[in-house]
Image (spheres, helix red, strand yellow):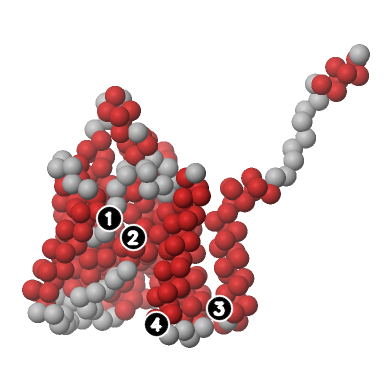
Amino acid sequence: MSQAVETSGAMPKATFSAKDFLGRYSLHVTLLVMIVLSTLISPSFLSGGNIANMLLQAAPLGIVVIGQACVILVRGLDLSVASVMATAAVIATSFSGQDSDTLAVFALAIGVGLATGLANGLLVAKRNVSPFLATLATMIVLQGMRSAYTQGAPSGNVPPFFRVIGSELFHGVPYNLIIMVVLAVVFSVLLSKTIFGRQVYITGGNPVTARLLGINSDRVTILCYVFSGGLAALAGLILSGFVGIVDNWVGRGFEIDSIVAAVMGGVALSGGRGTIPGALLGAAILVVVFNAVLLMGMPIQLQIIIKGVVIVVAAAFYVRRSA
C-alpha cells in the first residue's frame, strides 16, 4: 500500500518531445538548415566578405520588418513601405550631398515617412478603408510625386554620413546592423513590457474586447502605421547609403519581403500574435535564401521564381500554424 502511494506521488519525468522542440524552435532550425545547405552549395557562403555583405543587406530589410510587424499585429498591412524608402532615398540626393545637409535630409525624409504612416493610419482607423487599399493608394501617390519631382531621372549624391551608416563597419560590425539591433530591442521592449504593447496585442487579437476595456484602438492602430512609415524612411536612407546611387525604385520588393518575413516569423495576419525577434528570424531566412541564389549565379528570372516559391512556402507555413 505504501509502495502504491509512493509511486503515485512520484514526480513525472521530463521527456523530450521532438514535436514540441520543432514547434518552439522551428524558425531557428530552418535558419540553421538553410545556412548548412547554402554552405554546401557554395563554400564561399561563410566567407567573411559574404557574411559582411549579407549583414549589410539584411539591416534595411530588418528595420522595415520591425515596422511591418507592428502593423500586422493590429490586423493591418503596409504596402507603402517600399515607396516610402524610395522617396527617402530621393530626398537624400536632393541636396548638395555634403555632411552639412545630413540633419535636413534626415528630418525631411523621416517627416515624409511619419506623415505617410499617419495618412495610412487615419484612412484605416478613422475612415474604415481596408489596409490593402489605403496603403496601396499612398504608395501610388508617392510614386507619382517622385516621378514628377525627378522627371523620371533622379540625380545627386548621398551625404557621406549615410554612406557610412549604410555601408561601413564598426570593428567588423556594420553600422546599419547596430541600428537595427537597437531598434529591435526598443520595439521588443515596447511591445512586451509596456501598456501600449499590451494594447497592441489586445487590439489585434480582439477589437471588441479592446473597446470594452476602454482601449483607444484607433490611436493604437494609427501609431503602429506611423512607426512603420518612420522606420521605412530610415531604412530608405540607410539603403541609399549602401547602394551609393539612387533611382525611383530603391527598396522595390521590400513591401512583399517584409510581409513574408513577418508572417514566416510567426506574426499572425489575423493580428494579436507574434514578436519582433520572430519576425527578424523570418527576415534572416529570406536573406540567406536570396544570397544563396545569387552565389549560385542563377539568372534573374530564376531568382524571381525561387522568390515566389519562398513566398508560397511562407503562406503555407502560416496556414499550418494558424490551423
Q: Amino acid at mark 3?
A: Phe
**Mark 1 residue crowding within 10 angstroms, few (<14) / some (14–19) / many (20+):** many
**Mark 4 residue crowding within 10 angstroms, few (<14) / some (14–19) / many (20+):** few
94 displayed left or right of 230: left
Instruction: Tell me the distance, in whole angstroms, between the alpha carbons under discs 4 and 2.
Output: 24 Å
Q: Secondary structure at mark 4?
A: helix
Q: Secondary structure at mark 3?
A: helix
Instruction: Tell me the distance, in whole angstroms, between the alpha carbons under discs 4 and 3.
Output: 19 Å
88 displayed left or right of 179: left
Instruction: Tell me the distance, in whole angstroms, between the alpha carbons under discs 1 and 3.
Output: 32 Å
Total of numbered circles in the picture? 4
Between discs 2 and 3, the one toward the N terminus: 3
Q: Secondary structure at mark 1?
A: loop
Between discs 1 and 2, the one toward the N terminus: 2
Q: Nearer the viewer, residue 249 or 315?
A: 315
**Closer to us: mark 1 or mark 3?**
1
Q: Secondary structure at mark 2?
A: helix
Between discs 1 and 3, the one toward the N terminus: 3
**Closer to us: mark 4 or mark 2?**
4
Q: Is residue 269 above or below residue 285?
A: above
- Dot 4 corresponds to which residue? 300
Q: Amino acid at mark 1?
A: Asp
**Mark 3 residue crowding within 10 angstroms, few (<14) / some (14–19) / many (20+):** many
Q: Are marks 1 and 3 in contact (CB under 8 Å)?
A: no
210 displayed left or right of 222: right
Residue 64 marker: 2
Q: Is residue 267 visible?
A: yes
Residue depicted at 65% across the width and 47% down the height: 19
Residue 45 marker: 3
